[in-house]
Image (tube, coloured by chain):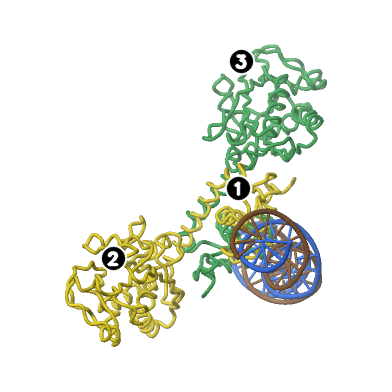
Chain colours: A green, B yellow, C brown, D blue
DNA sequence: ATTTATCCATTCATCCATGAATACCAGCCC
DNA sequence: GGGCTGGTATTCATGGATGAATGGATAAAT
């Protein structure tokens, strides 16, 4: 009746988007850090304010109605504008304190970053670090992370990326295993040993095939897509596997198998949103990462 | 510290925009229908969340800082998206009930619309009418009104407008005045009488001048920019003035002065946002206005 | 058939955001 | 200087939004 005067609360639109995205009140509540009853009320409030139903209440959750779908583009524009605001605000932040969110691959997060980040904390105690181990590619755009450390060249627009160098890969096994099963000396010898490889990681399998390995799922004696677990299998003496040179050299249990099979290298890229690049805080972490990674790269 | 997780409340951006626009917390509070302490808190909250000052606290109010100005474009995009949402939602509304906001010139609102709207209410009791007497030109875009009745051709994009016809203008005085001061018979005679005209309404003055009247502020014996008050001066017998034929003919106190001086006509336009045009509610009011205005037009 | 895991609606005590009231400050006009 | 009219900041009682808990319903899994 008279609610059209004070327009509608912008928070309701955010709730609408979250529910439309996740398809459920509970999911939206989790995403927004709220509670399911609150989300339910907000959606109902929005619907009565607009005088139309936006969702079908299904047993599995809430599904958009026609009317609801019509509002989606506008709501998304709103969200995009909100992101823009957050980005420019963060980019103009001065001072060396505040949170910085880093995303990096699981293995790098585990084996390389901790000492680097520890040193950084000593130099800039005001900076707090969120580390998100993940290989998902799209999380820089929506500011799920401020800085990404990736093993491939990021290609999104609006990102600034720098190639730090490459991580050398090698063939490794545990000393105990080699003592027991013997040390292969030629590439052919490798086939007498169990190989620790990957399951569904198409990328790595294809790379190996293109270099002459008969790499199929069946060829591997052990299969695990997680790089870190994979490496633990090597350390436990399950067989012969592939690993990062830096990680391997720091491990006294591990011995390199000196066969030249022309393995690829892993390119290491640093990336951030261009709006953030010159924020002092971000720049400091950026530099620390670039410097700290250097010893691990060729 | 950890507030960057749950992002920031979208309501704060609305508060930010309102304060930036109005230049004061109190002004923003008035616009948003809130209170000044609330606005103050919201701005402070936004500033601490972003870690930067957005406004200079001046004795006269709040002025944007550099950082604040940088956020303005994003905030405006957000507002625009919000308007889009409201428009599409309103455009998809079905059913013949709900509020419709009409804006029309003061004089038309006063003398012509009431009976039309009364009849409309009888036909569609579910529709409630907000009537905003105003000549401000820009209020359709931001949805301050759903339908505008204007005395000129609206030229905004995204608007659909229709020319209903023209209102004839004439020269009038009260019967009492003419009995007392005599009835002018030629255009020259007019100069012996006090003329009721306009003060700062450049448009009307220029129009009169282009038709051969020596219309300057000084030429008028009475000056008042409000059409309605201007007309009341005529009715009170202050002298000779200009008025709308329809209004004058309905008034037994008023007598037309039959001198042909080639007065202009007032074009009458109906306009609404194109997204609303086919909403049943809006369409109904639109038709009622078009039909109701017809007898007053030539 | 039973169990489990979803999800939504409802209730109710809690607590936080809200706004009326107030104090206070800086210009401005007389 | 005194009164007036804008403003902002602060306080404090209150009401409304919030979320934990609960109930109920449906689909998938055992």
Q: Which residue is mark 3?
A: A262
Mark linked to residue B64:
1
Front-lying residue, D24 or B95 = B95
Q: Under tag 1, what secondary structure? A: strand
Q: Secondary structure at mark 3?
A: loop
Which element carries disc 2, helix, strand or loop? strand
Q: Position of residue A180 (x, y in %)?
A: 81, 20
In screen coordinates, is A146 left or right of B288? right
Which one is closest to the eye, mark 1 or mark 2? 1
Q: Looking at this view, is B133 or B60 the one in front?
A: B60
Query: Residue B34's quadrant in the figure?
Result: bottom right
Q: Residue at x 52, y 55 (%)?
A: B79
Q: How far across and how far down the image is residue A13, in percent?
A: 56, 59
Residue density around tag 2, few if under 14, some if 14–19, many if 20 or more, within 10 Å:
some
Q: Are marks 1 and 2 on the same chain?
A: yes
Task: Tell whether label 3 touches label 2 (CB within 8 Å).
Answer: no
Is residue B266 left or right of B73 when viewed as pictured? left
Mark number displayed over residue B162 = 2
Rendered position, B255 above or below A107: below
- Tell me the subunit letter for badge 1: B
Q: How far apart, in angstroms, are the residues tagged by discs 2 and 3? A: 76 Å
Mark 1: give few (<14), some (14-19) or many (20+) Cα within 10 Å. Answer: many
Q: Residues within 10 Å of mark 3 (few under 14, many from 20)?
A: few
Quadrant in the picture for residue D16? bottom right
The residue drawn where x is 38% and y is 83% is B118
Task: Please state which of the two labelled residues, at mark 3 or mark 1, is closer to the viewer.
Answer: 1
Q: Nearer the viewer, residue D1 or A54?
A: D1
Quadrant where the C terminus of chain A sits is top right
Tell me which chain the residue with mark 2 is part of: B
A295 displayed left or right of A176: left
């Amino acid at each position: 009746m008279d609610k059209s005067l004070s327009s509608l609360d912008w928070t309701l639109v955010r709730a609408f988007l979250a529910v439309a995205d996740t398809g459920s009140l509970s999911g939206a509540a989790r995403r927004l850090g709220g509670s399911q009853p609150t989300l339910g009320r907000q959606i109902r409030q929005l619907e009565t304010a607009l005088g139309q139903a936006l969702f079908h209440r299904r047993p599995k959750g809430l599904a958009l109605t026609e009317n609801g779908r019509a509002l989606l583009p506008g709501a998304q524009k709103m969200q995009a504008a909100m992101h823009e605001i957050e980005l420019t605000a963060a980019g103009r932040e001065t001072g060396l304190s505040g949170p910085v969110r880093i995303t990096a691959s699981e293995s790098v997060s585990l084996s390389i970053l901790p000492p680097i980040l520890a040193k950084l904390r000593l130099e800039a105690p005001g900076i707090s670090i969120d580390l998100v181990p993940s290989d998902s590619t799209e999380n820089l755009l929506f500011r799920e992370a401020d800085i990404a450390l990736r093993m491939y060249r990021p290609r999104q627009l609006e990102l600034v990326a720098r190639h730090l160098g490459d991580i050398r890969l090698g063939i490794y096994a545990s000393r105990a295993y080699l003592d027991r099963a013997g040390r292969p000396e030629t590439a052919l010898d490798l086939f007498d040993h169990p190989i620790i490889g990957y399951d569904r990681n198409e990328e790595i399998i294809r790379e190996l095939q293109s270099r002459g390995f008969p790499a199929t799922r069946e060829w591997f004696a052990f299969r695990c897509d997680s790089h870190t677990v994979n490496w633990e299998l090597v350390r436990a003496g399950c067989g012969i596997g592939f690993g990062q040179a830096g990680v391997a050299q720091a491990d006294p249990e591990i011995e390199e198998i000196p066969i030249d099979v022309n393995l690829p290298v892993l390119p290491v890229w640093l990336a951030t949103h261009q709006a953030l690049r010159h924020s002092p805080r971000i720049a400091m972490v950026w530099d620390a990462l670039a410097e700290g990674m250097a010893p691990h790269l060729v």
